[in-house]
Amino acid sequence: MFAVWANNKVYLRAKDELSIKLKGLGCKPFATNELNKRFVLSDYYALTESILKDNVLMRTLIILSISQIRKEKLDSALSKIGRIRDLPNLSVKYERALKKVGIDNVDTLRQIGAENAIVRLKKADIGATEAFYWRLRGALENRNCEFYTEKEKERGLSKLNEILSANGFRRCKRTLKKVE
């Protein structure tokens, strides 16, 4: 829940840097509900009239709040998983390959990232294909690797190619078929 209507005010959920930004804009944190004193919302800030009138600013703040909540949910979901094989898209086969290059748990994989994991696999002469990259990336985003859009695939591939060439490896070719 990214926003709440209470006490005739709109409250937006925010943590860390977003909460600092909201405080800087004059937003006050949720105190208590007059009707029910036990009803308390932490991390919610009352939006000021000036923010409510500025559609662009309000839209930006809402998008930041939603992306913050999504990141929290993803971190929570991935922190519950300890073994690599339990991640979406991955199996024992991929877990074994990653263990050979020192990536033996989900936390390590998250710290290293999909691109650098592929570089490690290539340095160890272990078959690191483009499909393996998409499986890793999907696993880290808790998402099925088959559901990336063309734009996401292009961005991901360019990031992978950047890191591969920086480490002295050949760039991946665009092997994905265009749907007509």
Image (cartoon, rainbow, N blue to C red):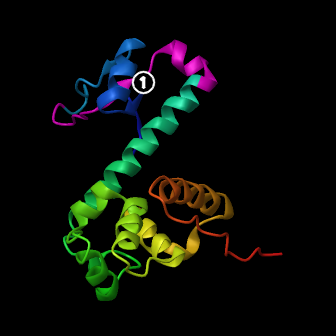
Q: Residue at x 32, y 49 (%)?
A: 72
The amino acid pointed to by label 1 is: Lys
Q: Is residue 101 above or below residue 11?
A: below
Query: Which residue bears the numbered disc 1?
Result: 9
Q: At which x and y percent is residue 113?
A: 36, 58
Q: At which x and y percent is residue 69?
A: 37, 46
The 10 Å Cα crowd at callout 1, few under 14, some 14 to 19, many 20 or more, is: some
Q: At which x and y percent is residue 123?
A: 37, 69
- Quadrant housing residue 16: top left
Nearest to the observer: residue 132 or residue 74? 132
Q: Is residue 173 left or right of residue 61?
A: right
- Confirm whether residue 59 shows in the render: yes
Q: Is residue 142 above or below residue 131?
A: above
Q: Residue at x 55, y 26 (%)?
A: 58
Q: Is residue 15 on the magenta stretch?
A: no
- Quadrant housing residue 149: bottom right
